[in-house]
């Protein structure tokens, strides 16, 4: 959209008259009697008292007040036989018979086993398999599967837990300050300064050896660029070795 000053067209006399009529009708309350006249009378399911509601709420409102709605009874769960408190509103709407979702899910598992399952003896077509694989929830399942592989130690990117290895004694705050000063407090990849980023730059080991704290093996990187170096390590190693030589 082009930038510039936009001047609103002035209202016509007809338009002004319509606006004034509508606002006057609203503020003076002339529309209210029309709504009240449409209200209907129903009886409260608890105290049997008659009260008025709008027709749109006929199938949703069963009680005259919060006190009536919050009254209830003790019922027995059909699965675990425990007693639980149930509001009358829940009984009227969905005829609650289980104390919790866990009990309800256990009953469903029993009902859906074997031949009772609607998918018993059927198989997914190739097209339906493709649609399932493209569903957004599939990405979540894949990430959970990756976590399981890491936990078992068989993930293709697993390096044997080297990220938990300790750094060398020479790798301290003074050395980090020296590297940042050498690199002019700028990320050597994206060239953003610490002032622009709002935090201190990370110090990256070029050969990925935490014990090697040689100045020529260290380089300043922002958090974003530092996270990229965890993948394709050989190429990054050669890239920063050549970059440090040019300094």
Image (tube, helix red, strand yellow):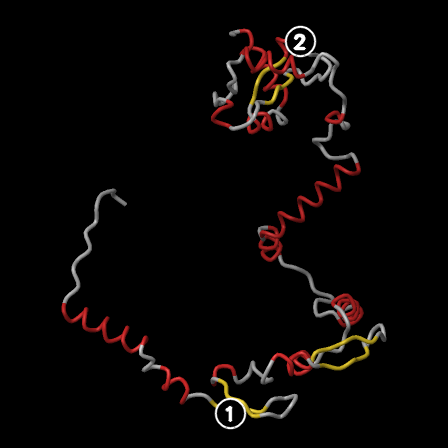
Question: In the picture shown, does residue 38 fall above or below 208?
Answer: below
89 sits to left or right of 19: right
Which residue, as the protein is rendered here, is positioned at the far left?
A: 13
> Where, by quadrant of the figure, is residue 150 drawn?
top right
> Where, by quadrant of the figure, is residue 207 drawn?
top right
Find residue 98 and report its horizontal and vertical position in percent. Answer: 77, 74
Find residue 220 and report its horizontal and vertical position in percent. Answer: 57, 18
Of 156 and 171, which appears nearest the observer? 171
Q: Secondary structure at mark 2?
A: loop
Q: Residue at x 71, y 16 (%)?
A: 209
Find residue 122 and report its horizontal and vertical position in percent. Answer: 70, 64
Q: Residue at x 55, y 6 (%)?
A: 245
Mark in front: 1 vs 2: 1
Q: Residue at x 75, y 25 (%)?
A: 162
Q: Earlier in the sequence, mark 1 or mark 2?
A: 1
Question: In the picture shown, does residue 172 fall above or below 231?
Answer: above
Find residue 233 and report its horizontal and vertical position in percent. Answer: 63, 22
Of 244 and 203, which appears nearest the observer? 203
76 sits to left or right of 10: right
Which residue, as the protein is rendered here, is positioned at the far front?
A: 28
Question: In the picture shown, does residue 157 fall above or below 73?
Answer: above
84 sits to left or right of 229: right
Residue carrying label 2: 214
C-alpha separation, residue under disc 1 versus residue under disc 2: 86 Å
Residue carrying label 1: 41
> Where, by quadrant of the figure, is residue 174 drawn?
top right
Q: Secondary structure at mark 1?
A: strand
């Amino acid at each position: 959209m082009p930038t510039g000053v936009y001047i609103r067209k002035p209202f016509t006399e007809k338009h002004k008259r319509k606006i004034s009529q509508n606002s006057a009708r609203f503020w003076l309350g002339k529309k209210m009697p029309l709504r009240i006249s449409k209200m209907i009378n129903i009886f409260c399911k608890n105290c049997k008292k008659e009260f008025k509601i709008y027709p749109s709420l006929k199938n949703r409102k069963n009680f005259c007040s919060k006190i009536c709605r919050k009254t209830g009874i003790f019922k027995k769960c059909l699965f675990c036989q425990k007693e639980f408190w149930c509001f009358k509103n829940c009984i009227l709407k969905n005829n609650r018979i289980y104390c919790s979702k866990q009990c309800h899910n256990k009953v469903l598992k029993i009902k859906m086993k074997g031949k009772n399952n609607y998918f018993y003896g059927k198989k997914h077509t190739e097209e339906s398999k493709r649609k399932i694989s493209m569903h957004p929830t599939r990405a979540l399942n894949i990430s959970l599967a990756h976590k399981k592989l890491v936990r078992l130690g068989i993930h293709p990117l697993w390096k044997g837990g080297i990220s938990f290895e300790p750094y060398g004694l020479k790798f301290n705050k003074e050395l980090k300050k020296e590297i940042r000063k050498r690199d002019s407090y700028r990320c050597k990849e994206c060239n953003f300064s610490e002032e622009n980023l709002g935090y201190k730059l990370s110090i990256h080991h070029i050969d990925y050896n935490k014990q090697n704290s040689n100045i020529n093996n260290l380089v300043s990187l922002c958090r974003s660029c530092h996270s990229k170096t965890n993948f394709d390590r050989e190429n990054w190693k050669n890239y920063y070795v050549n970059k440090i030589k040019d300094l």
